Structures are given as structure tokens and as C-alpha cells.
Amino acid sequence: MIRGLFRSAEATGAVCYIGRGLNLYSNVHVDDVAEVYSLALDKGVAGALYHAVSGETNYRTLAEAVAARLAVSTRSVDLGTALEFWDKFTALIAFSVCSRSRAPRTRRELGWMPSPDRLDILDDIDELVARRTTVRG
């Protein structure tokens, strides 16, 4: 999903979001997801659904963070414009809806808590910018 924000900057010169960008996105660090998988294998109940969520952020805030790190502007676009540089799934599903989840069952049954050192998704954006710069630079 965050990679889509980078793609919009490459395509338009600005990091784009749809409408007001206030739809929410639940997030979790990949290392915390790996821990949930491990705990589910060790302690999980067969057939149970375990979510891994450490926070949520709206798309506009994510776009602004990526834009600041790339030194470009942000831009609100309508759905038709979004379809010009994002595929249908990304435009219609990933960036147009709220994607919210909670993890009380995961915390209760598996004893999982996200790492306090990995709660800020904006830190992940810094890592992605650094990797993209290293790969392209």
C-alpha cells in the first residue's frame, strides 16, 4: 500500500491520495506479524482468525509523510484520476476504503503485543525511502 504512494509520486510528481484522504488504514510492522504467525502455530486454536494490529493512520497522513521524505507535494485526486496511475484494485479497494481491524483475540489468546519500538508506521516510511534511494542511487 505504501509503495502505491511512491508510485503516484513517480507518475505525477506528487504523492496522491483520494478525496480528503481521511479513510483509515490499520497497520502493523512485518516483524510483529511474524511473531503472531509463530504464536498462532504454538498456541493458536485451529480455525481461529488472528489479526495483528498495532495502530491506524489515515491515507492523507501517510501521503504527507512520504511526500515530506521525497521533497514533493501531495495532491488529492478523484477516483477517475487515480485509475490513471494505480491499478483498479489499488484505486478502488486499497486507497478508497477504510481498512480497519482490531486484535483483542490475538492479544488475549496468544498473549501477543506489538513491539513498542515498532509502533510508528512513519518509521517504516523512512526505511522504504532509504532503501529506494540506495537501490536507485
Image (cartoon, rainbow, N blue to C red):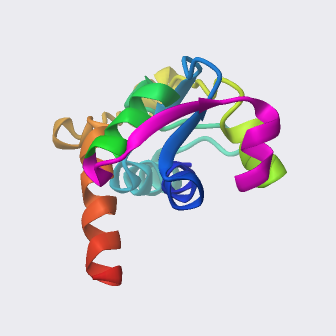
Residue 134 can be seen, yes or no = yes
Q: Residue at x 61, y 41 (%)?
A: 45
Residue 120 is a magenta residue: no
Q: Residue at x 25, y 53 (%)?
A: 126
Q: Nearer the viewer, residue 10 or 102?
A: 10
- In the visual, does 3 lie left or right of 112? right
- In the visual, does 76 lie left or right of 34? right
- In the visual, does 24 lie left or right of 135? right
Q: Is residue 1 above or below residue 119?
A: below
Q: Residue at x 26, y 59 (%)?
A: 127
The stretch of residues the image draws in magenta is 69-85
| Relative image position of residue 103 (x, y in whole percent) | 49, 26
Instruction: Give the number of marks.
Output: 0
Q: Is residue 65 above or below residue 21?
A: below
Based on the displayed image, in which of its 4 quarters is residue 11 positioned? bottom right
State the quadrant of the C terminus: bottom left
Q: Residue at x 47, y 27 (%)?
A: 60
